[in-house]
Amino acid sequence: MSNTSSDQKLVIAGTAYTSRLLVGTGKYKDNDETRLALEASGAEIITIAIRRTNIGQNPDEPNLLDALPLDKYTLLPNTAGCYTVEDAVRTCKLARELLGGHKLVKLEVLGDEKTLFPDAIETLKAAQILVDDGFDVMV
């Protein structure tokens, strides 16, 4: 029996996933609602906007990591809200530091504040810097 696309695992940066669904964390009222929604989704990869979400950089605020068991999910820090190469690279390095060496990131450098369309040239520049620094980059 041959594998069809429906029973093949998705492999990203050497890790195999059953679910192809990636879910973000930015639209829930609190960490409990986030946890429940993510559990119900069946997603294994969770995107986190580092500039908008506390994962330890603000010790006086609720930490999203308290709601996300790291043995259950792959976190995908992203550079949402970054308009320069420098901001995007700094944001990825912050995520790596806060997540104990985490290398997988979702990258975009925004080019237009109204449409939020990415700046492809600046995104490519940031991607090269991050890859050279050992990151696994999803654009």
Image (cartoon, rainbow, N blue to C red):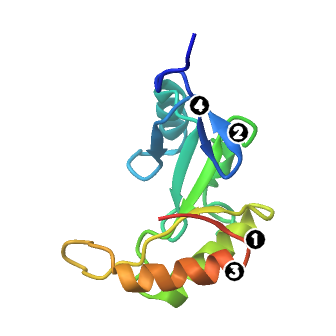
Task: Please tell me whether mark 1 or mark 4 is closer to you in this view.
Answer: 4
Q: Is residue 69 visible?
A: yes
Q: Which residue is mark 4?
A: 9
Q: Is residue 57 visible?
A: no
What is the CA distance from the residue labelled 1 to the residue labelled 4?
29 Å
N-terminal of the pair, mark 1 or mark 4, is 4
N-terminal of the pair, mark 2 or mark 3, is 2
Rendered view: 120 above or below 49: below
Decide: marks 1, 4 in contact (CB < 8 A)? no
N-terminal of the pair, mark 2 or mark 1, is 2
The residue under label 3 is which amino acid type?
Asp
Q: Say which quarter of the image contains residue 130.
A: bottom right
Decide: marks 4, 2 in contact (CB < 8 A)? no
What is the CA distance from the residue labelled 4 to the residue labelled 3?
28 Å
N-terminal of the pair, mark 4 or mark 3, is 4
Residue projecting furthest to the front: 1
User: Considering the numbered disc 3 on the image, is that residue within a helix, a strand or a loop?
Assistant: helix
User: Considering the numbered disc 4 on the image, is that residue within a helix, a strand or a loop?
Assistant: loop
Q: Which residue is mark 3?
A: 132
